[in-house]
Image (spheres, rainbow, N blue to C red):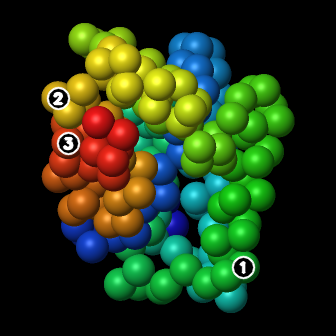
Amino acid sequence: MLSPFKSLSETSRVWIYQCNRSFSELELEELKNSLDSFITQWTAHGADLKAGYEIRYNRFIILALDQSLNAASGCSIDASVHFIQQLEKKYEVDLLDKMNVSYKQGEYVAYKDLADFKKMAKQKAVSGNTIVFNNLVTSIGEYQEHWEVPASESWHSRFM
């Protein structure tokens, strides 16, 4: 059951998929149609799931599930991962690689593999004040409060 992202409860579970590049305007339109279709049909053991999504910075797909109606099952989570894998193939992008870091350079969102980000921290090219994206948040409430934060307030702080 597709629901507007903003209407979902703060306790809704989120999964954040960061892309290794920005999607084009055409890709974004196709992506929105694909997400609408997937979520409309997304179920757990045949029961509708109340879910929504948003796309931020033309690069992050945030999938949210309000589990107050029905909770995700292993099969429904597998279905969402399979869907994301299909998007990776279609657009020739990385969405599931968790060993990469996205951070802000002014208004631009940069993307580096973790090893390069560590080197940048050692070289002081990024600091505790650098805005990073904490894709480990698990709820809409956490996403709203702790997703886009200074590196010093995230797991990234271990590299500073």
In this rendering, the label closer to the viewer, 3 or 1:
3
Q: Residues within 10 Å of mark 3 (few under 14, many from 20)?
A: some
Q: Position of residue 33 (x, y in %)?
A: 61, 38
Q: Is residue 90 above or below residue 124?
A: below
Q: Is residue 10 above or below residue 21?
A: below
Q: Which numbered disc flags the more N-terminal residue, 2 or 1?
A: 1
Q: Is residue 58 visible?
A: no
Residue 152 badge: 3
Residue matched to label 1: 75
Q: Position of residue 155 (x, y in %)?
A: 33, 52
In this rendering, the label closer to the viewer, 2 or 1:
2
Q: Which numbered disc flags the more N-terminal residue, 2 or 3?
A: 2
For label 3, the SS is: helix
Q: Position of residue 12 (x, y in %)?
A: 34, 70
Residue drawn 55% across and 80% down? Answer: 72
Residue matched to label 2: 129
Query: Pointer 2 and pointer 1: residues touching (CB < 8 Å)?
Result: no
Q: Is residue 112 left or right of residue 10?
A: right
Label 3 – label 1 distance at C-alpha:
36 Å
Three-letter amino acid code at disc 2? Answer: Asn
For label 2, the SS is: loop
Q: Is residue 88 above or below residue 23?
A: below
